[in-house]
Amino acid sequence: MKKVVMAAVGGTLAGIVATTQFVGPLVAQESARTTNVYEQLDLFGDIFERIRAQYVEEVDAGELIEAAIDGMLTSLDPHSSYLSPDDAADMRVQTRGEFGGLGIEVTQEEGFVKVVSPIDGTPADDAGIEAGDFITHVDGDSVLGLTLDEAVDMMRGPVGSEIIITVVREGEAEPFDVSIIRDTITLTAVRTRLQGDAVVLRVTTFNDQTYANLEEGLAEQIEAAGGMENVEGIVLDLRNNPGGLLNQAIRVSDAFLEKGEIVSTRGRNPEDGDRYNATPGDLAEGKPIVVLINGGSASASEIVAGALQDHRRAIVVGTKSFGKGSVQTVMPLRGDGAMRLTTARYYTPSGRSIQALGVSPDIVVAQPRRPAETEEEKETNVFNRSEADLRGSLNNDSLSEDEVEQIEADRAKAEAAAALREEDYQLAYAIDILKGLTALQPSND
């Protein structure tokens, strides 16, 4: 016991000696840094006063300071910014699920506005805007050189008004204009449906409603299927989901995990890190899960996909996700404004950061561009006939009524699957994977 105490005391004394020896230089360095900061602030004050006094036009001092603050924050990374009182109020409304605009999540890359993803069912989605598009002009005016907030302000306007945006898209030789009518954007966080024997959970955003919508929608579809025993599995569709609230991503991940880490965050200081773990309970009751992602799946979407992938709870299908692996904290400021500051990186359960790398799918499946159907193909489809369509054809009397009904039901399922493959190849592929996983599960008989 004495040895332990002595060792501790010895360590403390050594620390005191070391501090005493270097306290002079350390204080001098800190003093020099402080002096340098004050000199820079004096320089800022000088420039501010000269602009106010000598700029060719009179300027608003408040707007000038806000621009300086925003410039300071946006110089850090694309996701840190100053939110004016109006912008802060808009952000609070968006997290509740309803706001006015075009319906796109954007970021900034090389001076241009880049579309992270269009939101399902919004004017931008209906107009054909795609994840990865670059917006170069708004109503003919270039956005090059503007901050992201300034570019977004250009795209705002009264509901019902028209906006023309110029788009540069990979694979297209020339920029092209897209006309969009602004509208009130009402976000349905989760849409659910039965596709054959699979439940499809289409999660479009992570706002205050997401987990509640998912839990309720899943329960409804299970009931519609006649119970979980009739469900092959679940497709969690996170394509073109730009993210949102961290706590909702954690809850959605937890919905399908029984235990283990979901995500961890690490800031500049190790002690500021957080780790979030799953709690017992799996809404899918162990049924197979396929997660769909693409280049428009970002942030909170990547947290969910990464967590389910690392725990081998789901097979991730699609294309590489966006790669936003940072966490922003919104800090209220005096005057009802706010500051959005990147405060941490997040890591999947295996300890990987997806910043700038994205989540790589287990099975890469691209969504093919669907060519327009020609008139000849339409005629061929209309007049595609079989033996049963011929007048006077013989009946098949070797099968019972029940057997015929079963064959017709199987054929209807196959035709629905084929139609889905034409409409949404990635989703059809995910459902095929569920069928294969279900076939491999041991029978309960």
Image: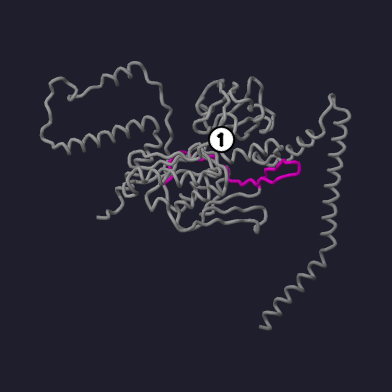
Quarter of the image for the C terminus: give it.
bottom left
Magenta stretch bounds: 315-342
| Image-based side of 21 in relation to 189, left or right | right
Residue in the image at 55% along x and 56% along y: 276
Q: Is residue 4 above or below residue 426?
A: below
Q: Which residue is mark 1?
A: 116
| Image-based side of 151 in relation to 324, left or right | right
Find residue 150 and report its image quarter. Answer: top right
Neighbor class of circle 1 (other Cα within 10 Å; few <14, some 14-19, many 20+) is many
Task: Name the kind of residue labelled 1 in the image.
Answer: Val
Residue in the image at 83% along x and 63% along y: 23
Residue in the image at 82% along x and 51% along y: 33
Q: Position of residue 293 (x, y in %)?
A: 47, 40
Residue in the image at 70% along x and 38% along y: 83
Find residue 39 and report its image quarter. Answer: top right
Q: As rendered, which of 15 and 419 lies closer to the eye?
A: 419
Q: Is residue 313 above or below residue 192?
A: below
| Image-based side of 223 in relation to 149, left or right | left
